[in-house]
Structure formats: C-alpha cells, structure tokens
Amino acid sequence: MSKEYILRVKCPDRYGIVAKVSSTLNKSNLFILDSAHYGDPENKYFFMRAKLIYSENELDINKFSKFFDKECRSFKMNWSIKEAGYKPNTAIFVSKYGHCLQDLIYRVDSGILPMNISCIISNHKVHEKLANWHKIPFYHVPVNKNNKKQAEKETRKILNELNIDFIILARYMQILSDQMCKDFYGQIINIHHSFLPSFKGAKPYHQAYKKGVKILGATAHYVSSDLDEGPIIDQSVERVDHAKTPKDLELIGRDLESITLARAVKYHIERRVFINNSKTVIFS
C-alpha cells in the first residue's frame, strides 16, 4: 500500500524553487497530491508545504534525504519530510481549569486530532481521575516560588523519558523558564483569553464585565520567552452584550479557548504552520 508524506521547505526566496523541488520529487517517484507555497515580500523568505504519495511501497527516507540535499543544496533549504500519518507524542500541561483538556481528549478519542497523548502534567491533582479514566499517565508536579527549578527538572525528565515532541499548555497557569521556552521553541502551544481591552491577572471575565466589553476572544500561539507574545497560530472572537453576566462571559470564553486551541493544534500536527520571525505562515 502506498504511503503519503508531508514535505516542508523554508529558504531564502529566489526564482526556480518550485520548479527544482518538483523535478527532484519527480525523479524520486514522489507524486504531489497537493501543494501550497508563499514568498514573503518583506523578509524575502519562501515557504512550501506539499503532500506527497510514493509510487512504490515505502520511501527510503535516508536515501531520499541525501538525494534531495544534493539536488537542492544551492537553495540553502531548511526542509523536512515525514509520513503524513505521523502522530506526535504529546504532553498536555493543565492547572485547575479543565475545559481545554477535556476537549482535546474528546477530539483525540474521536479521531479528530491525530496525536498520542503520552501524559498529562499538572501542578494540581484536580484532573487525575479524568486521566486515569482515559488511561493517560498523570504526573502531579507542584510548582511554587521556591521550587521552580526542581519542578522544571522533574518535568524535563518526564518529557525525555516519554520522548515528547509536542507540548500543549491547556490553561496551564505557570510561567515556563526562558530556557525551557528556547529549548522547545516551535513545539509548545499555549491558549489564553484575548480582550479588547486586555485584562490580566485574576478574574479577567469579571474585569471585562465591569468594563462592559463587547467582544470576547481567544488566542493560540507558540510559546516564547516573551510572555504571551509568541507567534500567533489562531484567534477567535465573539460579540457579547450588556445582558451577559460574568459567568456567561466565562462560559463563552471557555468555548472560544477550547475551539481555538484545538484548531491550532490541528494545524501544527498536520505540519501546516511555519514560524516566520514573530509571525506565522499557515497553509489551510
């Protein structure tokens, strides 16, 4: 049975990239099922994602990689290829609020999100029963101002032992260290509310209610060392009116957070997202 693959290419923009990639794939007996590309006119960089099918049984990745490197060396490409059905080993970090966690588990169980939930890591024990019910390993790693380094050391050990290659912060209310953000850059997605104006700190929906906001929102982004300022992957908004109570706003916000995070996770798993400096390029 033929297998499908996802090829990703990022390189300085110039003439002839698409033609060279296409001819190289043709020589390798790889057929393009669909393809999308974009040349950023501002920073002069080129991005490409192609879904491929191999005309024979199974592609020899090592052999293909050497050939592709040789053929496309002059373009100085940062590229990768993986089986389209690859499921990342995922760690979900969560604190007390479980709406995003439960939504992700449902989508994985339903086959909507193709990933392996290898573990749930939390600074509280609130969701341990949920993890046990779904037979997902649960790790309680308490975090306070005095044990942050030890907690991160314990967390990193778990990630290494389980060969984690994707992390989701599903309303995890702890700040990761700068080094953690750098080491896993492009592999951690966070979700948070986003208001106009913005409200930080405790009870943001109560703050929004007092200010009479008319729009609620949620933002999913890659985590960087700049708090809540990593490259944005997806956003959602919904209009509200004067009749909504703080509880109503919170419930609407939770739905927005769950939907937005799930969509961003899906884009990432399907390898549709490219980090482009402080922004992203996403092929839908």
Image (cartoon, rainbow, N blue to C red):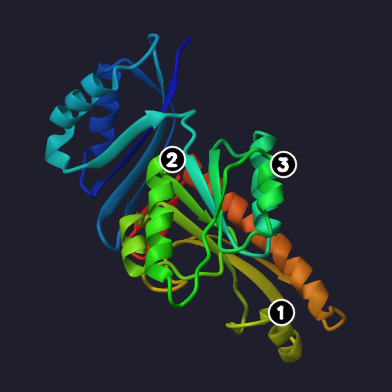
Q: CA distance from mark 1 to mark 2?
A: 37 Å
The answer to whether any part of residue 25 appears in the image is: yes
Q: Which residue is mark 3?
A: 133
Can you tell which of label 1 and label 2 is closer to the viewer?
2
* Rendered location of residue 49, percent (x, y): 39, 39
From the viewer's perspective, is residue 26 above or below residue 169? above
Give, as a three-letter code, the residue at label 2. Leu
The tag on residue 186 is none
* Rendered location of residue 201, percent (x, y): 59, 83
Element type at marker 2? loop
Q: CA distance from mark 3 to mark 2?
A: 20 Å
- Residue at 41%, 51% in the rendered image: 187
Q: Which residue is mark 1?
A: 205
Element type at marker 1? helix
Of 201 and 64, which appears nearest the observer?
201
From the viewer's perspective, is residue 149 above or below residue 40? below
- Residue at 39%, 64% in the rendered image: 150
From the viewer's perspective, is residue 270 above or below residue 252? above
> How many numbered markers are drawn?
3
Give, as a three-letter code, the residue at label 1. Tyr
Query: Is residue 167 rendered to the left or right of residue 210?
Result: left
* Structural crowding at the residue carrying mark 2, measured as other residues with C-alpha within 10 Å and reported as few (<14), some (14–19) or many (≥20): some
* Rendered location of residue 14, percent (x, y): 20, 47
Query: Is residue 269 rendered to the left or right of residue 132?
Result: left
Q: Which residue is mark 2?
A: 162
- Residue at 47%, 38% in the rendered image: 88
The image quarter containing residue 57 is top left
Element type at marker 3? helix
Give, as a three-letter code, the residue at label 3. Trp
